[in-house]
Image: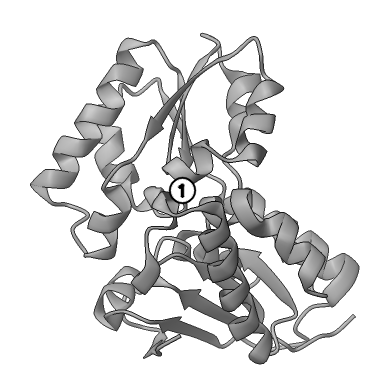
Amino acid sequence: MNNNHPIGLFDSGIGGTSIWTAIHQLMPSEDTIYLADSKNAPYGQKSKEAIIALSCKNTEFLLEKNAKIIVVACNTATTNAIKELRAKYDVPFIGIEPAIKPAAHNSNTQRIGILATKGTLSSELFNKAVEIYQETTIIEQIGHGLVELIENGEIHSPEMTKLLHSYLEPMVAANIDYLVLGCSHYPYLIPQIKKILPPHIKIIDSGEAVARQTQKVLQEKSGFHSHGVGENIFYTNANPKVLSAILGNQYQTLQKDF
């Protein structure tokens, strides 16, 4: 089944480009449109009602661009709004949730850590997922300030290093053997995180799993781009230089007020 319309993705900012990268690597012939709502980042401090409203606005922007499927490349938006999005719009949605399942199933210490936003950790969807793994101790840590630093291009700043030490060292002391990254921004911190964690602690994010699920849904419902190399367009309502720097400056990045 052929469908040359683009895959749409949105996030509260630039972090969801980690999800876009996994999708693009798996399906390089697909056209993509990425929407970074950096003006309203982070979503994790907002109310559920505000997150739903922003997610609807982002969805409508992507539907105007003829998106055939929409990837909610934001843990907070997924856990707070995807139920409402699926009920309101006639397009397949792919969500992103913290990868608790593989961490819990593979943990030897039965102690795993999760670093995520307040909005994700306090959501009903996340807490339902946690309830399944009663035999695993899940140590939750809100990543206060991390998204803001990433959005400002301060990934390697002393402040970032200080925050990561304060969040991760208690988890190490608690004997975790898996760290789940529960925000699509956080994969960009993996090099710094690896410097803090002992080598036996494995880091899990959701990018590859989301890409595979997107491919599966396209095959079942929407169809694939028929040929060639895909066109990739990125929109942001903030300074496009930060998004361009994350992407490596080789993709079209457009500033748009939305």
Return the x and y of residue 173 as percentages of the image width and height. Answer: 30, 11
Using the rendered view, name the quadrant where residue 127 is placed: top right
Q: Amino acid type of disc 1?
A: Cys
Q: Does dot 1 land on a helix, a strand or a loop?
A: loop
* Residue found 74% across the figure and 55% down from its top: 83
The picture places residue 81, in percent across and down from the top left corner, at: 64, 57
Q: Residues within 10 Å of mark 1 (few under 14, many from 20)?
A: many
Viewer can see residue 59? yes
> Between 32 and 140, which is closer to the camera in this rendering?
140
Give me the residue at 61% from left, 37% from top. Answer: 126
Give the residue displayed 41% in from the left and 84% down from the top.
Answer: 251
In this rendering, is residue 183 above or below 225? above
Residue 3 percent location from the top left of the image? 81, 85
Q: How is the image coloured?
A: one colour
| Residue in the foreground of this view, choosing between 1 and 238 | 238
With 166 as the anchor, is 176 left or right in this view?
A: right
Q: Nearer the viewer, residue 129 or 213?
A: 129
Q: Is residue 154 left or right of residue 59?
A: left
Q: Quadrant of the C terminus?
A: bottom left
Residue reaching furthest to the left:
158
Where 106 sits versus 161, above or below? Answer: above
Does 230 appear above or below 184? below
Q: How many marks?
A: 1
**Can residue 29 be seen in the rendering of this structure?**
no
Q: Please state which of residues 143 and 225 is positioned toward the viewer in this rendering.
A: 143
Residue 241's spot in the image, x, y percent?
25, 80
For the point 71% across and 22% down, the residue is: 132
Quadrant in which the N terminus is drawn: bottom right
In which quarter of the view is residue 194 placed? top left
Instruction: Identify the residue under disc 1.
Output: 183
